[in-house]
Every structure is written in C-alpha cells, then in structure tokens.
Amino acid sequence: MTADDVWHRALDAPALGTAGLLEGDLALVSVLLVHGSVMNGGVLNAVEDSFSDQELDAVESGFRWFGLEAAARVFADTRAAVAPGTLTLAEREALELEADRQYESVVPDDEFLVDVFEARFAADPAAFAAV
C-alpha cells in the first residue's frame, strides 16, 4: 500500500463510501472534501451551505488529526460567528475574507496537504486501511 493509493481512495470515498476505512482515512476524506469546497467557494460557503454540522465536526477532527489545529480553528471560529444568524452583510463579507485569509495562511496550497498527509502516513501507516 502506497501513500498514493490511500490518497486516491480518499478522493473516491464520497462516491464509494467509507465502510472499512480507519481513522487516518476518515480524517483524510474530511480534509480533502472541505479543502476542495474551500478552493471553489470559500470557508464561509463550506460552513453555511456545503457541509452539515456533523460533517464540519469531522472536518475539524480531521485537521486536528493531521496536526493542523489552526485550520480546525478557522472552521470552529467561522461556525461560531455565523451560529447566531445576526451578521450584517458587511460583517458577513468581512468574515468571509478573514476566514479565507486565515485558511490560506495555514493551508497555502494543495501540495501542502499532500506533504502533511505523506508525513503522517509515513509515521503511522497502520492508521490507514489496506488498499
């Protein structure tokens, strides 16, 4: 089993399901799903429109599992800010810009996530199901 095999399985998981996957796989699936959403629509869109509370809990846990506490905090803070539902349009726009800026400062590009995953996979391959 290679890191590439695990990565590609995680990319296919939304269509194929997550039965039989282990902790590392589930963390990777959540992180990759939200990362793609953020790259297309931003953090605020992911929080408000693209993911359920349960899925966002998994996203935060996934980032923490990979040692990316700051990325998890971006989602937790954004969720907390929108929860009351009282933001003005100007506040929403400011939140959107700030959340995206914070995310990009922690996860600057796709390659960064590849590097983080590969390091964790090398350190703990047993956290991922056999391919």
Image (spheres, rainbow, N blue to C red):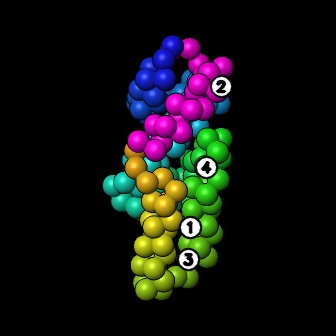
In the drawing, what numbered circle is on residue 85?
A: 3
- Rendered location of residue 105, percent (x, y): 49, 61
In the drawing, what numbered circle is on residue 131?
A: none
In the drawing, what numbered circle is on residue 78?
A: 1
State the residue position of label 2. Answer: 124
Nearer to us of marks 1 and 4 is: 4
- Rendered location of residue 76, percent (x, y): 62, 61
Give the distance between the C-alpha atoms of the residues marked 3 and 1, in whole angstroms: 12 Å
The amino acid type found where label 4 is placed reads Leu
Give the distance between the C-alpha atoms of the residues marked 4 and 3, in whole angstroms: 27 Å
> Tags 4 and 3 in contact by the CB under 8 Å rule?
no
Mark yes or no: residue 108 visible: yes
The mark that comes first in sequence, 3 or 2, is 3
Q: Residue at x 65, y 30 (%)?
A: 23
Q: Residue at x 49, y 23 (%)?
A: 3
**Residue in the foreground of this view, choosing between 9 and 121:** 121
Kindly state the secondary structure of the residue where label 2 is placed: loop
> Tags 3 and 1 in contact by the CB under 8 Å rule?
no
Give the distance between the C-alpha atoms of the residues marked 3 and 2, in whole angstroms: 41 Å
The amino acid type found where label 3 is placed reads Gly
State the residue position of label 4. Answer: 68
Give the distance between the C-alpha atoms of the residues marked 1 and 2, in whole angstroms: 31 Å
Q: Residues within 10 Å of mark 3 (few under 14, many from 20)?
A: few
The mark that comes first in sequence, 4 or 2, is 4
The amino acid type found where label 1 is placed reads Thr
Over which residues does the magenta segment extend? 111-131
Give the distance between the C-alpha atoms of the residues marked 4 and 2, in whole angstroms: 16 Å
Type of secondary structure dominating the magenta stretch? helix
Indicate the quadrant where residue 70 lies.
bottom right
Q: Residue at x 46, y 37 (%)?
A: 114
Q: Residues within 10 Å of mark 1 (few under 14, many from 20)?
A: some
